[in-house]
Image: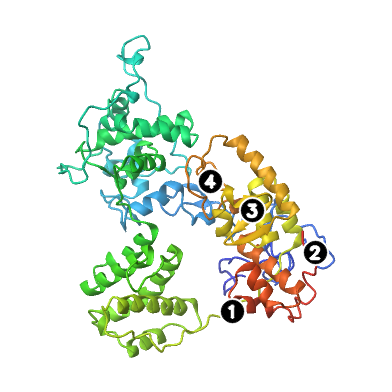
Amino acid sequence: MPAPGPNAALRLPPKCNQCQSNRVAWTSPRVDFCYQCLPGRPFTAPPCNRCRARTDYFSQGLCSRCHPRSPEHIGSCKGCLAWGVYPRHNWTCWSCRWWQTHYPKGTCAYCGRASHVSDRQACRLCLENARLEQGPARAPDLASANQGSQQLFFANMVFRRRTTPLPDYVTWDGRWSKKNKNQLPYQPGTSFDDHALEQLTLFNMDPDPAVLRQRLLVEDSELTRYCAAIVADHARSYGWSVRQRNAVIQSLRLLQILRPTPIAKVRASDVVALRRYDGTITSTLDVLAEAGLLIEDVPTRVERYFNAKFIESGALPDAMREHFQLWLQIMLGGSRHAPRQLPREPETVELHIQGLAPVVQTWVEHGRQSFAEISKDDILAALAALPAGTSHRHFAENGLKSLFKILKGRRLVFANPMKGIDLTRVATNIPLPLDPALIRAELDSPNPAVGLAVALVAFHGLTGKQVRELQMTDIVDGRLHLGGRDIPLAAPVRTRLRAWLDHRNRTWPATANPHLLINRRTAPRLVPGGPSFPWKDSRVRPRALREDRILHEIHATGGDVRRIYDLFGLSVEGATRYMKTVEHPDLRNENQPGTRP
């Protein structure tokens, strides 16, 4: 709905109360339905007030392209001001997303904007403008290129691979072209040491890209020879294309050219830095790890978030910092020593860090030097400053409980100050059913991966993570074996499973990935797909679809909590949340048997 005030910016409108798919037709005056679900429907949506388009109506008299909170609204990148980004990617182009994970925030020394700046104190926009005027074998002149004006550009159009002409001495009839130097055996005694003394650089100067690409064509790399057998084995086992195999070989040559110490093992951060030279990252990391030459030094997303909250500021006392790092290590990797603990999900650890950050900052401002000084009164005072019944307080309480439990188990604090403090309950919402027509439409999606994923959740109530981690061996003779359960697959699921397997065999016939759902990125590897696959191409989400399935089951059984407890693996509290909807006046006649797609 609109923000307060007559001229305030529009907010994201709520979804239609009937279909839960489209946005409401109007927010001022308030209308709780879309034009397809208005009483006396159907109604034709009016044209857009700005562009007068008669298609893709969104809300408040605007189409999906003109409404400022629509997922299809196009705008400028927050980092480089490039045109052509969407709000679902946080108004950031692909290059700036990588840029933000590798460079800190600051003020650009050339344009004065607050943005992520590189080692030369330049934002990405200033650097791209300097590269437009960069001469051969010359470093980018940032000062002169950004003095008068700047050239803007379209987003996500800087990944065009460069073509390099062959040198004059490389001919097709000469001796050079008759030998396959990538398959030659490496010299006896070739070894790579992770403790080798590395030559430090005196000046940080990036090599000229044109000269570098010329050297790639004639480089006879020991690293390439050392990994040649592993590259060939990966290409054969995982179904790599010729282009992908050659891209990995080229990346290995790049590493050998750029590294100051050729006999040292390869750091993962050096491989990630190959993006600026059009290098292949993930496949090269797999090959180096298989060869035993990789040193993992790239922090994960949770570790970067942890460092940004607690370490980079330098305000955290040494004792607290050591205790925090021990807590993070045990949360992510678990502990085999008493008290034992299983690893937690990275998303859970990130929520704990989000809740702990304001509380710990308050203690540091009051002069606390160690967690051993924290008492129960300090915790209650810190929690009282947070709004009661909100998610921030819930995250803080869970984070403090986890932190002091680990510190007490390692005897780093005298007593657990969280003992005896009751955790506040977070208010839950009422699960709502989805429109059966929407589910049927997604079941008949032209994308076979979407149809299979929606069918598995709609008919058998799997979670998004379970669908993502399903393997080919989990389905035998039309039955799904999942977590000790033997589930007979429904007929619509088997139909969509056959369609997906046919598509998978046609598209990736030589893949060795054991997971059921794969895509272009995971087919040449052994990892599962990301959380957004294949749901980014669907109008429903697995959580809402699973809630609809559980809601239908609880209404069909008349409130049998034990049944949904066994079928879907819910806790007693989670099952009770659905039982409360049985007598709800708005849901009493919804989702009766026989209404499922």
Tell me which label, 2 or 1, sits earlier in the chain: 1
Residue in the picture at 57% in, 36% down: 508
Q: Earlier in the sequence, mark 4 or mark 1?
A: 4
Q: Secondary structure at mark 3?
A: helix
Give amino acid for label 1.
Answer: Glu
Query: Quick one: label 4 or label 2, which is nearer the N terminus?
Result: 4
Give me the disc on residue 514.
4
Q: Identify the residue under disc 2.
A: 595
Q: CA distance from mark 2 to mark 1?
A: 27 Å
> Could you tell which of marks 1 and 3 lies nearer the N-terminus?
3
Q: Which mark is residue 453?
A: 3
Q: Which residue is mark 1?
A: 573
Structural distance between the alpha carbons of marks 2 and 3: 20 Å
Secondary element under disc 4, as helix, strand or loop, is loop
* Separation of residues labelled 4 and 2 (CA atoms): 35 Å
Kind of residue sitting beneath label 2:
Thr
Q: Are marks 2 and 1 in contact (CB under 8 Å)?
A: no
Vertical arrangement, residue 371 with respect to residue 64, above or below: below
Report the Cα–Cα distance between label 4 and label 3.
17 Å
Which amino acid type corresponds to the residue marked 3 in the rendered image?
Ala
Observer-nearest of 496 and 124: 496
